[in-house]
Amino acid sequence: MASEATTSRATSSSPIKLSRRTPKPSSTLREPITLDDSPRNDEQPQPFISVPSSNVDQVPTGDIAIAERRRPWTLFKTCFENFDLDLQSADWDILVASTCLKVLLFPSYHSTDFEVHRNWLAITHSLPISKWYYDTTSEWTLDYPPFFAYFEKILSIPASLIDPKIVDLHNLNYDSWTVVAYQRSTVILTELVLGAVVHRFVRGSVDSSTQRIISASLFLHPGFLIVDHIHFQYNGFMFGILLWSILMARNGNKLASGFLFAVLLNFKHIYMYLAPAYFIYLLRSFCLSPTGVLLPSRFLSLANAVILVFLISLGPFLLMGQLPQLLSRLFPFTRGLNHAYWAPNFWALVTFADRILLKVTQITGFDNLAINESGVNSTSRGLVGDTVFAVLPNIKPVHTFAITIAFQMIYLVKLWRLPTYKSFLAALTLCGYTSYMFGWHVHEKAILLVLVPLSLLAAESHAYFRTFLIATVAGVYSLFPLLFTPAETLVKIVYSLVWGYLVFEPLHRKIYEFPKSLPFVIIDLLEKIYLYGFFLLQLFVSLFPLVSAGSSGSANSDSSEETGMAFLPLMLTSVYCAVGLVWAFLRLSVIYIRQSETSS
Amino acid sequence: MDEIAVAFPEEGSSSHQRLHGRTTSFASSSQTPTQPFSRQPRIRTPSSSLRHRSSFTSVHSNTSNTSDIIAPIPRRHHTLQAHESRHWLDTPPLSPSAARSDSPMSNVTLSPQALRPMASLTAVLEDTQLDVSFPTQTRQRHTYKKESSESSMARRWARWMHHHGMKDWIIPWVTLVAVLIRWCVGLGSYSGQNTPPMFGDYEAQRHWMELTIHLPVRQWYTYDLQYWGLDYPPLTAYISWLCGKIGSAIDPPWFALDKSRGIETSGSKVYMRSTVLIFDLLVYFPAIILFTKIWQANRSVRTQHVALITLLLQPALIIIDFGHFQYNSVMLGFALLALDFFASDNDLLGALCFVLSLGFKQMALYYAPAIGSYLIAKCLSLGLANGRLLFFRLAVTTLASFIILFLPFLPPFTPLSDIMQPIIRIFPFARGLFEDKVANFWCATNVVFKWKFWVSKGALVKLSTLFTAVGFLPSVLGLIYSGYRIGVLRQEEKQNDQKESTTTNPLLSLLPYALLASSMSFFLFSFQVHEKTILVPLLPLTLLMSSSAADSVTFELGVLANNVAMFSMWPLLQRDGLGIQYIALTLLWNRLIGYNPFRSKPTSFIHLISLAVYAAIILLHIAGFVISPPSHLPDLFPVLNVLISTPVFTLVWLWSIKRGVEVSWAMGTLSSSSSRQSTSGNQHSNSYSRATSVARSDIGDEVQSATSSLATPVEFPSLIATKKRTYRTRSLGFARGDKIKLEWEREKERERVVSLGPGAVR
């Protein structure tokens, strides 16, 4: 088995050797990525990572180069290795067209997250660092890790020059044209990290034309358009770092991969969902030799790199003794199982089942089941707060953790036995997926955590593609309720259609396989029916408000909202998407577990 | 694939490469470039490049391992080879130039097929043999090479979709993209948002919906004229009524009489925007799609798709209709539908559509001289009997549709005294010569000569009418004269007992130029012009542009005029708060059509002018951003804007007249010379169909060269005129309809090869 692992690693690292032939100084090439590396500039003089190049005997070839010329700044430099972006005209086309579209979306609806981020600009700009995590001027307190706070601090400097009112702490709910244009352009600009990284994925890939489609699909993902450019967040930037880390893993530069992931964790802690896969992968394929012997120097260098990142991030707060306050901001355990709009995961199905059971018991008068009265009152309107089941036993955070970890263990064992890049990607996706499926108070935006790494696997085989297709369609659709204003409805639907057609059609043509046996034919058919069902669902969701307003009349339109009927389209959306996402989850798990450990 | 790219490196400018000459390959097995086989062409052509081409006919071997052969060849020979190799075997739809080239005779973009009949008969015969025997691999290799030199984003896009087998879906897909862009522009603000008490054009349109659903028809043109009284023709009123009815059904307060004035809820905004989008989809989109299918029927599918993208994402129309808020696309769409029907020989339907266009917005009147004279010319060209019949039917159709359109405002329904009311409202001669700063003759010259002080209003009306008439007269007369000439020619044919060999209508090629000249002269010289009205002349110009080669004058001028039109509306857009939409749309469209004037050194007069104009525009924008105008010159920037834009529009106007004259002269010359020369019946019919196909050939021709070659029509070998052979003779868009057949077959074969992949060839 060990020899197999070695060969597989050798093959996986072969494209890297090719690409490493022309290492270029990255001073001029860093420009597109300057925005995000600034927090890390501080670590250049660090002396931690100096590994003696003694034990290179068992090191796979791809890492020799790093091990030999490791100097203090090498790690930093390797992240940028080969980052010259020779953009072809097609790449420019995508960049120009998408930027124009995003600019046109400036005046569109933006959620409270917009004000949240504006408030953070104000906090970081006008308060000393010691008060960042204590300020409660606005209800939108700072609850992201320190790197993101530093990031906001940097963004606040130009903002204060453009319009001082932006960074005024007490100027709440400020949304003049200047702040909208400024904040939206920062999203577009920082998203270039994502663009640069996915562009780099093309080079050194096995099938560059397919990878090109996947890369373009990631850069243009409707999830990012909906969540970042309309709803407002910085996911494109952060997923850029995640993909950067994955890219480093693909290129065999695992130290940089771990380092970047640590950086990412300090930008947004939601990526902790992915941490187990990273841990196992780096431990097994980087810190241990194929025979299972610990390589202390590698282990230490990785540990040092990660600790260093955390020190830079949390250090100031550690010194000020603010760590408990910071952590309490980051991990508030005061929310309910479901969000206002149920994220379409396993719990959405359970909650739905509970509602159905409640109706059934109420209609049949079947009183044997003990009905939880507070659960009846916790109506399907889905207020923010604790969801209490009426019929089914209630769920506690501990349960969700237990289930999540149990599932993750399965994939991690598999990853331990098959520590290749592809296996890592699948395990990474599944770790994110498990957390999304069973996590406590999951937000629907977290589906991006699944969709982004899954996209990289889309062209592996038809089975993967099919999973990707179902998960993406259901996942993107599940983001639609984020934009509830009528004006943006057309944008999200049309854009998703345009994008979906461009991505799915060529990939489908490339790797289509006939279903092999009758069960697969039936599954294939059901999946198709499910996918086409989204058109019906959208039709229902669009027409429902008109019909219900028409039937109840304008006078009692408020009362219809009170009766919980207004929640019906949302609930249907959630449940319908949950069906697809759970199915895709099972599919992916089965594909991954059944994957032969010798072939890949 | 990379290997192929190495084997065919990029050679200089692509335009040079497009000159790939025809080669005479007589051996395909040799490993080295053989001695050039010189053969003096037996033709005299105006094109020097042609001569150059045919005197060096080296052979490029096409054995399988070509890279071995080509790689070591020195640079000089390499260049030679690049256009002496067998590239000519490429089918035109593949190469951007060939596919886009307008006239085959344009000396910049010679498509090899077009050149072939110019050579001697032997050459034609050799070609025939080669056509049969050339190997597929050469062709395929060429395909890949061309990919790297695709010039514009739209083209790359279309190619990508074609290659991934999504060809059939490209029209719905482009439609979706166009809808998306339109809607995104619509998310922005509109004319008169948050500016009580009068608001802007948005409120005007909304107000018409409100008043038409609440008032009887006779009050439509009289109700509270001070607050956005209805001043568009009846079709607008009817459509407003329809929109108002539906809107009221959704939410009555949106259109409550008087109470809804200035309503700015998000719901009503979405509704208003969606009405524009729906009418756009119902009228303008089909008109554009039909245009690419009918007018560019003899172009490759991909070129049609590129033209579709170019037209659908034309920035000026989008930003006025979806940003500023108007329904111009309905008026333009009906006018364009009329053109489509004319081109498919449904003159009556065309006339009806044009009446609808006029009935929607009186600005369609700018087209009226051209359309009217086209129809007259068509009647003339049909000869006495047929022409009279057609004239009669056209007259009846037009009159009847006008009467039906105005029926509610005519005597039985409205008192006789009020009959003039809509007319007075529609043609506001009571207003001034121009209102805001508009980039036309009057406003521009007003800087030095204050018209309003020196000339009375009545005289100004007459003067402007006179200028306008003089402006469009050349093209109108050209059309009618050509119609008359063709009529004479047909008459002669009949006398020679010829059957009518063609159904194509040569007048069609004149029509876009006439439309452009007429509408532009209206824009420049007529009374009471708005800056938005530039959309009317922009339509024919963009139509011409959409099918022309990227390095032709038509293209450069078309893009320049489109960009300057956007710029000329800048003061308006700035007021509406559409700054980012202005930038984004212009940038996107220029990227789509692959236009970047700063990329290459200026090669032509137009290019030089473009550079100067763009420099001025950028300077003015920067100045407008940085400094505020001095207090005694508050209108400094708008006036400078006018002074930059007007010359460009004047240039377009002059160019359109010139082109119109050229095209009609070319037809006239040809028909007279051919009729003089007609010795045998065969040749005669051929010359005639050539004349028609020249005219019919794609709008956007480089007629300078076309005319020069047309002036020497003797060069055509008479033999190729035999009926059997017609599809082989590809000069001048000659018998184009047949040519497509061949190209189409070739394209199919090529696609099959491509879809099989490189491995399949070996």
Image (cartoon, helix red, strand yellow):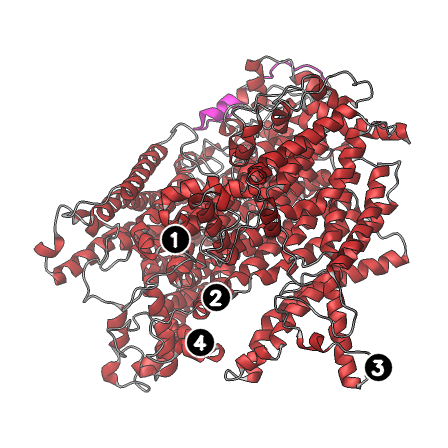
Judge whether residue B509 can be spotted in this image.
Answer: no
Where residue A415 sits in the image (x, y, percent)?
A: 82, 40
For residue B397, what is the image quadrant?
bottom left
Q: Which residue is mark 2?
A: B274
Disc 2 marks a residue whose amino acid type is Ser
In the image: residue B501, left or right of residue B133: left
Q: In percent of the image, x 78 and y 25: which residue is there?
A: A296
Q: Chain of mark 1?
A: A
Q: Which residue is mark 4?
A: B242
Cβ–Cβ under 8 Å for marks 4 and 2: no
Q: Nearer the viewer, mark 2 or mark 1?
A: 1
Where residue B316 sits in the image (x, y, percent)?
A: 39, 52
Q: Which residue is mark 1?
A: A177
Q: Chain of mark 2?
A: B
For mark 1, give the secondary structure: helix
Q: Is residue B435 above or below residue B65?
A: below
Tell me the distance, in whole angstroms, between the alpha carbons under discs 2 and 1: 25 Å
Q: Quadrant of the N terminus of chain A?
A: top right
Tell me the distance, in whole angstroms, between the alpha carbons under discs 3 and 4: 59 Å
Q: Which residues are magenta?
A: B30-53
Disc 3 marks a residue whose amino acid type is Asn
For mark 3, give the secondary structure: loop
In the image: residue B435, left or right of residue A523: left
3 and 4 marks on the same chain:
no
For mark 4, give the secondary structure: helix
For residue A246, what is the image quadrant?
top right
Q: Chain of mark 4?
A: B
Q: Which residue is mark 3?
A: A368
- Asked whether A349 falls inside the magenta stretch, the response is no
Judge whether residue A376 can be spotted in this image.
Answer: yes
| Magenta highlight: main SS | loop
